[in-house]
Amino acid sequence: MGPLIPSVNDAKMNGFDDVLWLLDDYIKECTALNVFVLQQSRYGHLELVTPPTDDGISDNTMRNTILEMRDHIQK
């Protein structure tokens, strides 16, 4: 997180809680928070999505619990 510190400090000084990093319109990472998006699919269904853990997103208990609840509700 070293090179990100100036950006995070700037965001916090401007009243934001965290920084969301994007690359080519894809969420790549957050500094501390889990990120979830509730969106409508092209078929009209609501879906809860979150970035994959293969690009620096933390694979943690809270994230996994929310995804398990989502999967349970969708069944």
Image (tube, rainbow, N blue to C red):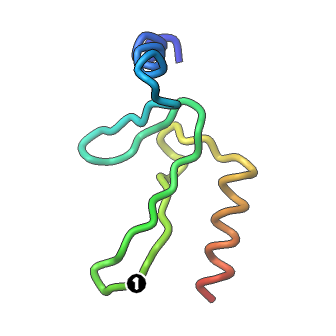
The percent position of residue 35, horizontal first and vertical second, equals 52, 49
Q: Is residue 19 above or below residue 49?
A: above
Dividing the picture into quadrants, the one containing residue 3 is top left
Q: Quadrant of the rendered structure where residue 70 is?
A: bottom right
Residue 46, percent across and down? Answer: 43, 78
Total numbered labels placed on residues in the image: 1
Q: Residue at x 26, y 47 (%)?
A: 25
Could you say which is closer to the camera, residue 59 or residue 66?
66
**Outermost residue to the left:** 24
Q: Residue at x 67, y 63 (%)?
A: 66
- Where residue 39 appears, as percent x and y from the top left, is 39, 69
**Quadrant of the frame with the C terminus:** bottom right
Residue in the foreground of this view, choosing between 67 and 44: 44
Kind of residue indicated by mark 1: His
Q: Read off the residue under disc 1.
A: 45
Q: Is residue 24 left or right of residue 1?
A: left
| x and y, in percent, of residue 61 in the image | 75, 51
Callout 1: 10 Å neighbours few (<14), some, many (20+)?
A: few
- Is 66 on the left-hand or right-hand side of 22? right
In front of the other: 57 or 43: 43
Give the answer, above or below, for where 4 lies relative to 56: above
